[in-house]
């Protein structure tokens, strides 16, 4: 009943329903493309270090899961258990389906809130899904994509409710979706709660106020649980689940480069779209909130807990919608004319020129997006997005063909782990980079344990001092200097014996 009601509300025009199916399939294909190029290995830092290990060993990770908004990973685990599919298939399958849902939500935003026709809605949708901010988010922040998609649908429902009236089915659906958002992703949940609170203060609509109260209450409960249910976050035998971002890279210079690379191209037409969009308050609020949070580093330049890098990327997602709308407004609403001098006669061809211009712009962004999805992890192949990789590399990979190692290097890492399984004692301790902890949990066998640290030498000395008889090995890139003699090397990764 709810599903039929939801479709009725969001697809009031019958012909849109077929377009929505097409849009969903387009989104799925776009998200499937980088997976096909990386197959059979996963892409995405959190995919290999969080989603797949937790989906595989859910019970072992419960202390961590319960303190980190467990809804999404719990669904992944439930599907993994009930279907018998391996964790990789479940995680990737959900990522593809969710991106299809996200693509539909952008299309509906364009149709319902931006009030453009189907052709322009398809243009806006295509423009958005190939932006680096969107592709970076779907690379490994899968639950963020899900939460953003639901949030955009909630915005549409609130707008339709104000126009068409409220009833109990509508309110129940709205509250249910609000609950899903705030229990799925922390950052998206926070911007959603703030947006609802501001909007309810502006509009003073009872249903919106109720949504704001429910969403903020549930979000507060989630935050309380995440801070108090587990005093120490564990990751099986892998130690503390450190964040992806190297703290030394979190500084004003790198964050400025990140803002330029992710959001720079979108700002000019984004400003136009923001100014020209009438009655778009509900969509403008999260844009402004994420923009303010993106510059939190100005107040506290080196405080990584503010997550300015994540806010900059989230800003790019919202900004891309306004940028696409602003581009349409500039090209089609403002009379841009091409002039051809033919025997001193000026011939104006506004519409053909507009179509050619907007097609070229869209084509450039699509080419950049596809290149970002499939190119090797090297700056020259990723055009604009590859600029400044030495500054933004810890926030945004130069290509989606990367997990915690290049997709092309994954086989060699797994081969090195397989050698460890066959040629080291079962109680061995392996030390190495924190970025490989997911691979180690998935492939290391027979009671071997993996430990990591920012200072590998100190960690090795500490283990030798505390457990002098334990077999201790060090896995590292072959080019890295190591005092330990190598007992194995496949050219890319080497294993050294420490004790």
Image (spheres, grey):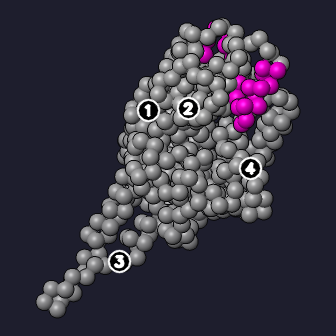
| For marks 2 and 3 on the same chain, the one whose residue lies earlier in the sequence | 3
Residue at horizontal 79%, vertical 15%?
Answer: 468
Answer with left or right where residue 360 lies relative to residue 3.
left
Decide: marks 1, 2 in contact (CB < 8 A)? no
Residue at horizontal 76%, vertical 28%?
Answer: 459
Q: Give the range drawn in magenta.
A: 444-465
452 in relation to 103, above or below: above
Decide: marks 4, 2 in contact (CB < 8 A)? no
Q: Circle 2 is placed at which residue position?
A: 477
Q: Where is residue 295 in the image (x, y as percent from the top left)?
A: 70, 61
| For marks 4 and 3 on the same chain, the one whose residue lies earlier in the sequence | 4
Q: Residue 336 carries which label?
A: 3
Whether residue 233 can be seen here: yes
| For marks 4 and 2 on the same chain, the one whose residue lies earlier in the sequence | 4
Alpha carbon separation for disc pair 3 and 1: 46 Å
Residue at horizontal 77%, vertical 31%?
Answer: 458
| For marks 3 and 1 on the same chain, the one whose residue lies earlier in the sequence | 3
Where disc 2 sits, the SS reads: strand
Q: Circle 4 is placed at which residue position?
A: 304
User: Foreground mark, 1 or 4?
Assistant: 1
Q: Circle 1 is placed at which residue position?
A: 408
Alpha carbon separation for disc pair 2 and 3: 55 Å
């Amino acid at each position: 009943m709810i599903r039929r009601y939801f479709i009725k509300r969001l697809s009031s025009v019958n012909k849109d329903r077929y377009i929505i199916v097409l849009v969903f399939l387009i989104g799925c294909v776009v998200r499937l493309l980088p997976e096909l190029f990386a197959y059979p290995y996963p892409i995405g830092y959190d995919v290999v270090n969080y989603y797949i290990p937790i989906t595989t060993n859910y019970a072992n990770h419960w202390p961590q899961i319960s303190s980190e908004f467990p809804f999404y990973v719990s669904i992944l685990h439930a599907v993994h258990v009930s279907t018998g599919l391996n964790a990789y298939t479940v995680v990737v399958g959900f990522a593809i389906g969710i991106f299809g849902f996200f693509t539909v939500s952008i299309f509906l935003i364009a149709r319902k809130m931006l009030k453009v026709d189907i052709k322009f809605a398809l243009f806006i949708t295509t423009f958005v899904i190939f932006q680096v901010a969107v592709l970076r988010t779907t690379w490994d922040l899968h639950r963020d994509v899900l939460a953003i998609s639901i949030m955009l649908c909630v915005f549409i429902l609130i707008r339709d409710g104000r126009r068409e009236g409220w009833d109990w089915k509508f309110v129940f659906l709205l509250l249910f979706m609000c609950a899903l958002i705030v229990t799925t992703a922390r950052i998206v949940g926070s911007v959603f709660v703030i947006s609802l609170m501001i909007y309810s203060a502006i509009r003073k609509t009872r249903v919106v106020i109720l949504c704001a109260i429910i969403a903020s209450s549930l979000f507060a409960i989630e935050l309380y649980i995440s801070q108090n249910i587990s005093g120490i976050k564990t990751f099986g035998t892998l130690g503390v689940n450190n964040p992806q971002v190297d703290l030394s890279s979190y500084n004003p210079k790198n964050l400025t480069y990140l803002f330029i690379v992710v959001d720079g191209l979108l700002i000019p037409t984004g400003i136009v779209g923001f100014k020209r969009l009438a009655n778009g308050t509900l969509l403008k609020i999260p844009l402004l909130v994420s923009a303010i949070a993106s510059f939190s580093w100005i107040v506290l330049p080196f405080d990584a807990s503010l997550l300015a890098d994540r806010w900059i990327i989230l800003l790019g997602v919202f900004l891309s919608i306004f940028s696409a709308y602003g581009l349409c407004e500039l090209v089609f609403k403002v009379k841009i004319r091409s002039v051809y001098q033919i025997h001193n006669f000026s011939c104006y061809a506004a519409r053909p020129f507009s179509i050619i211009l907007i097609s070229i712009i869209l084509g450039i962004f699509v080419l950049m997006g596809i290149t970002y999805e499939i190119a090797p992890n090297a700056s020259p192949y990723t055009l604009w997005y590859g600029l400044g990789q030495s500054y933004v590399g810890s926030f945004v990979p130069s290509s989606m063909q990367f997990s915690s190692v290049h997709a092309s290097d994954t086989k060699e890492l797994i081969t090195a782990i397989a050698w460890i399984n066959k040629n080291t004692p079962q109680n061995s301790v392996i030390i190495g980079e924190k970025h490989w902890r997911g691979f180690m949990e998935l492939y290391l066998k027979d009671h071997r344990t993996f430990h990591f640290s920012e200072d590998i030498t100190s960690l090795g000395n500490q283990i030798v001092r505390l457990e002098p008889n334990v077999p201790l090995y060090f896995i590292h890139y072959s080019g890295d200097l190591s005092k330990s003699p190598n007992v194995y090397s496949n050219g890319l990764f080497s294993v050294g014996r420490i004790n």
